[in-house]
Amino acid sequence: VTATGVDELLALRGVTRAGLEAQPDVTVASGVSYGALSGVDRVHAPAFSPAHFYFAGADLKLVYVPRTAVGDIRAADWLERVGTGPQLQSRTGKRALLEVRPALGFAFSHDEDAVELAEVFSPTTLAEYEREIYEDPGSFVR
Amino acid sequence: MDHRVGEPGVTQTPLAPAQRRRATTEHPMLALQRAVGNRAMAQLAQRAPSGTAAPPAAHAPGAEYLVVVSGEPVLVRSDADEQRAKSIIDTVSATYRISVDSLKGVKATKDHYANAPQAERDKIAAIPWHIRELVAVKKALDHFAPILGQARSYSTRGAAAQEISTLGKVNTSITKNTAAGVADPDTLGEFYGSSSTFAIYQSSETSTEDFPGDVDKQIEATTTHEIAHGLMHYMIDSFIAATGFWLDEDTKSGTSDAEHPPTDYGNKNAREDLSESVMLYFVDEARLKSSCPKRHAAIREAVTLWAAPVGDFPTPDPNATTAMA
């Protein structure tokens, strides 16, 4: 799996915990949090994917794709694919925007045209996303 | 390097005595703009050498008045202040190779908020320094002296280009880089990596967010934070590894037993955490050491390495009779 296209990332929702844990280089961090998600397990098998998979038991709650995997992607290309939608303050910096497409189950942060990270989750509403996943970083003043 | 060296001279319109007197009683920015106008102010700040802003004039004792020092507008209360300002600006330029150039601070701010409405971006302007700010900025830069200017070439950072080349005093940032962006009354300072520039904003003149009642220390701290964004980012990976709090630059590890950042502000991402930690390391080391020993140790190790010998040099024989230059 290479993290290049939105659809390719969305397909990561089909990854199972059992499949990941069968990978020879898998690591599991139990009882961690991601944003508003808490009490989840973070499963990572870098030879399979640069993404980090967060599970509650066997249920995949979120896939986090770091900037090391998406840093060469143009935000304009992804915006063309996902269309316009809600923007939240990104944790990555004052000028960065978190583009949230809850019905698609996809969010990504970008500063101008540089993609910084991506999140894949089950289709939901913006209110649910903000309650269950998003953590407001607060204002950046320095 | 002083970027102004070699620029052609520009005929200036000096402040009239009446204008200069007014500057001692009005809000400095308003007085300055009234005196010379925004465009002329920009030229003044960019071009004028020291001491050409205005003819000698009488000042009420203790009142602030505007001078131009090495091309930068500075509010001073005495000739001694003016000399001190000149010493700081010139030293920062010559020793640390950082130009004090508020117009470049304005440009960097505007460039990085290109998606904000033009009317809001047009509000961004250079404003005069206060002496206390220059003193605090110099103190902040002094913390990084081993990796600035000529000294950097002898340090372990010598192979990497200096990440900061310009600093400026600017009235305001913008809240966000979108069509909804407006002039930002809260941002204290901002580092613009692609411009190698950081700006100190007007809001820093009164903020005591981290050091209640101590504006000077807060300015030093804010400036140290901004400098750290540029000069210390090279250690982000070792910092992340040392703390265990971060999975990567942008995301927390989410493990409950990791050492937390020293301030709430440091919770945003690892870069802000590093800048906050470096800020405290230099400005309130006891606080960092007691609350975040892992962060303190990681930064101490990095700072200690700055001056480590580089290369395979012969060790002088203390008993030798031949002096070594």
Image: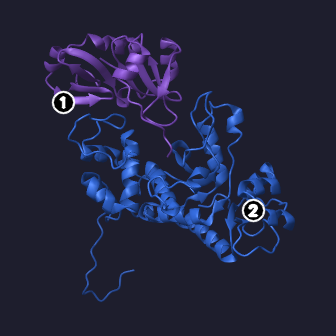
Chain colours: A purple, B blue
Specify whether B148 is left or right of B288: right
| Crowd band around label 2 with a 10 angstrom C-alpha radius: few (<14), some (14–19), many (20+) | many
Specify whether B213 is left or right of B48: left
Nearer the observer, A124 or B156: A124
Q: Can residue B224 be seen at all in this image of the molecule?
A: yes
What residue is at 35 percent from the left and 65 percent from the top? B307
Nearer the observer, B24 or B142: B24
Q: Is residue B121 above or below residue B103?
A: above
Residues at marks 1 and 2 touching, judged by CB atoms closer than 8 Å: no
Name which residue type carries label 2.
Answer: Ala
What residue is at 45 percent from the left and 19 percent from the top? A100
* Pointer 1 and pointer 2 on the same chain: no
Q: Residue A79: give x, y in percent of width and height.
A: 51, 17
From the viewer's perspective, is the residue at label 1 or at label 2 nearer? 1
> The N terminus of chain A is located in which quarter?
top left
* Label 2: which secondary element: loop
What residue is at 31 percent from the left and 43 percent from the top? B237
Q: Residue B193: give x, y in percent of width and height.
A: 51, 44
| Crowd band around label 1 with a 10 angstrom C-alpha radius: few (<14), some (14–19), many (20+) | some
Name which residue type carries label 1.
Answer: Ala
For mark 2, name the chain.
B
> Which residue matches tag 2?
B48
Nearer the observer, B227 or B33: B33
What residue is at 64 percent from the left and 60 percent from the top? B129
Q: Residue B119: give x, y in percent of width and height.
A: 72, 34
Q: Is residue B34 above or below residue A111?
A: below
Image quadrant assignment for residue B9: bottom right
> Which residue matches tag 1?
A29
* Label 1: which secondary element: strand
Image quadrant assignment for residue B71: bottom right
Specify whether A52 is left or right of B178: left
